Image (cartoon, rainbow, N blue to C red):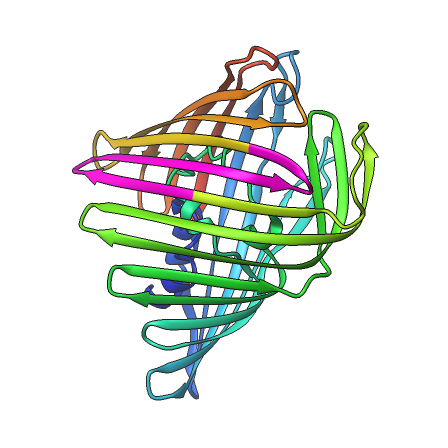
Amino acid sequence: MKKVSLLTAAIIAGLSATAANAADVFKGDNLNLAVGGRAEARADFDKDTNDRTVADNSRARVNVLATTEIADGVQAKGFFEEEINRSGADDSAGYENRYLYVGVAGENNELQYGKTDGSLGMITDYTDILDAFGGEAGNKTATADRTSNQLLYIGTFGGLKVKANANGGGAADTFEKYGHVVKGTIDQGYGVAAQYQLGDLSFGAGYAYQKDKDVNVTAGGLTISPNAESQNVLVGASYQLNDLYLGGLYTQGKLLDQDYKGFEVASKYDITDRILLAAAFQQVKFDVADETDQTVAANVHYKFTNAFTTYAGVSKDLNGDKDTIGRLGAILTF
């Protein structure tokens, strides 16, 4: 459905499929209501362990989109999406609100406020294309990714797409790597990104800045200011050559005062209309560690129907510090 696709343009292909299959459940009195979602069974092998265990990491998402026309060619929209997931061996459920915003949209412009996407997701989407794993080089601040108390603008001008967002603060923020855990609260932030489509070639760049307050170290030996800063610089591109897709991403910046830089390349190939192969290589280095993380991931995807797909994925840490991990999954979208 076109209206829902516009709302989810910044979400990766696997996620946007959920909203694209949303069905109208009510029409009348200048109000349209659509409901969509996905149920995804995920079995993880050797996740964070070396004892050949299998973990049930299944999840489900449900979203609701309401639209009403407030002027000729102008709509008001309300969108909500909740995720329910496994949260431990005791079979309990965890809940995450992914989106909750109201927006106003015309033919080429849209303004949203609430829990929305940030600006940089459409740049990291160039390489975040696998059903499982991958996308690990796209480190972003919460403001650049998705968070609450956010005002987001989306503009489309021919082949040019622009996003800009500003955050009023208040949401929790965490940096967790190499045994270091740093927590804070967003004070303020902003981001801007642009993407241009030229035939089968797409390229874009973005920048985001975020300031945190009440920052404290809960694990590890880092010394950090209580008013830490984060910033992201991203450059990406993709090329579609018949059934072959190629994507690349370069990133650098800092997260809660921790400097990093990295890159990722990803590719997917449609063997048939039903079978897809995808692979990615990423390299990231944080100055807080004396090592460079290198990971390769791959998966095969089989589509039974437009609503039901299955996949198998694997991820290998090339540094040898972690065991190879795998995932089997099945997704039913509605």
Q: Nearest the camera: 237 or 171?
A: 237
Could you say where residue 62 lies in the image, as x and y percent from the top left? 54, 56
Magenta residues: mostly which secondary structure? Answer: strand
Could you say where residue 58 lies in the image, as x and y percent from the top left? 58, 37
Residue range highlighted in magenta: 235-260
Could you say where residue 64 lies in the image, as x and y percent from the top left? 51, 65
Question: In the image, is 58 to the left or to the right of 89?
Answer: left
The quarter of the image holding the N terminus is bottom left
Q: Nearest the camera: 148 or 333?
A: 148
Q: Is residue 64 above or below residue 317?
A: below
In percent of the image, x 36 and y 47: which residue is there?
Answer: 307
> Is residue 21 in view?
no
In the image, is residue 249 part of the stretch drawn in magenta?
yes
In the image, is residue 15 part of the stretch drawn in magenta?
no
Q: Is residue 284 above or below residue 69?
A: above
> Is residue 228 in view?
yes
Q: Nearest the camera: 53 or 258?
A: 258
Occupied quadrant, residue 271: top left
